[in-house]
Image (tube, rainbow, N blue to C red):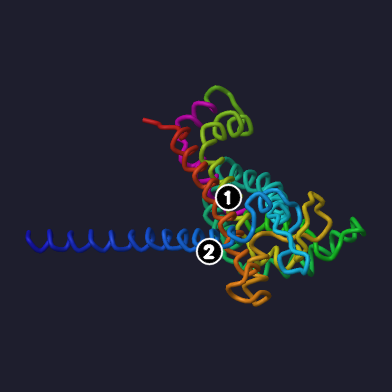
Amino acid sequence: MYYMKYKEKLIEIFFKFCASITIFTTIGIIAVLLFESISFFRDVSIFEFLTDTQWTPLFSEKHFGILALVSGTFLTASIAIAVALPIGLTIAIYLNMYAPKSFRKTLKPFLEILAAIPTVVYGFFALTIVTPFLQTIYPDLETFNSLSAGVVMGIMIIPFISSLSEDALYAVPKSLKLAAFGMGSTRFQTAFKVMVPAASSGIIVSVILAISRAIGETMIVAIAAGQQPQFTLNPTVPVQTITSFIVQVSSGDAPQGSVEYKTIFAAGLTLFLFTFTLNSISFWIKKKYQEKYE
């Protein structure tokens, strides 16, 4: 009896230790971002940072307008969601409503393999395959552009939406599905009028998490979207995202400790605030609107 209590206590201490590592790591990251960002804003006006539409900290004529990077980030993420949402949701509905169980067990792991492919592979796929293909349709498309990067990023995040949405649909009680069938509904009607509304909170959460993943993507946009920060919504021209700029400066384009180098912390803090806000919204939606069944 004493041995079991001692064992349980050790397991509890181990779990608390693991949780504390996560908490302190997060606190450390936030502290570094805040400390370095405060140092950056001593030299650069916050008003200029938030309102200027030019981002040229590495040029002789310096501008520190984060909007140029934000527009590139959200442009590529929007294209990615436009690709991933209809495909991912369709796959989730097919797996839940139409696919035989044996086929579902086979297909789902193959879909999740997409999430395991290194993003650098996706980047070169966008640059060498997708961009030339799109240029045959639209010849004015530049070699580096947000369209091909967004399309491939959408392919990459399909498993996030399809897997999480399918899990949300699977969590809906079978009694609702059977009741709809008993009332004479077709599979299509049952899927879109019963199952999807019942699982809507989980589906919305999957989309928000996919957006967070797209916003934080680095290698695809660094390789395929270019490194020209522009305040634009034109998907055919080169853009630069927050993550690709951080990679550019971290690779040695600015001396450590300079204002130019500190821009990566201000950009990183901006990215952190975006992803933290999106994750908080997804947590709130799941908690507030998740259906509870007896």
Q: Main secondary structure of the magenta part?
A: helix
SS of the residue under disc 2: helix
* Viewer-nearest residue: 288 or 102: 288
Name the residue carrying label 1. 274
Most distant residue in the front direction: 42
The residue at 68%/75% (across/down) is: 253
* Viewer-nearest residue: 101 or 152: 152
Q: Which segment did they paint magenta?
A: 158-181
- In the rendered image, residue 218, in percent from the top left (x then y), is placed at 64, 64
- Amino acid type, callout 1: Phe
Residue 249, by quadrant, is bottom right
Horizontal relation, residue 20 to residue 140: left or right: left
Name the residue carrying label 2. 36
Residue 68, by quadrant, is bottom right
The residue at 63%/76% (across/down) is: 255
- In the rendered image, residue 149, in percent from the top left (x then y), is placed at 73, 60
Q: Is residue 87 above or below residue 31?
A: above
- State which tag comes first along the sequence, 1 or 2: 2
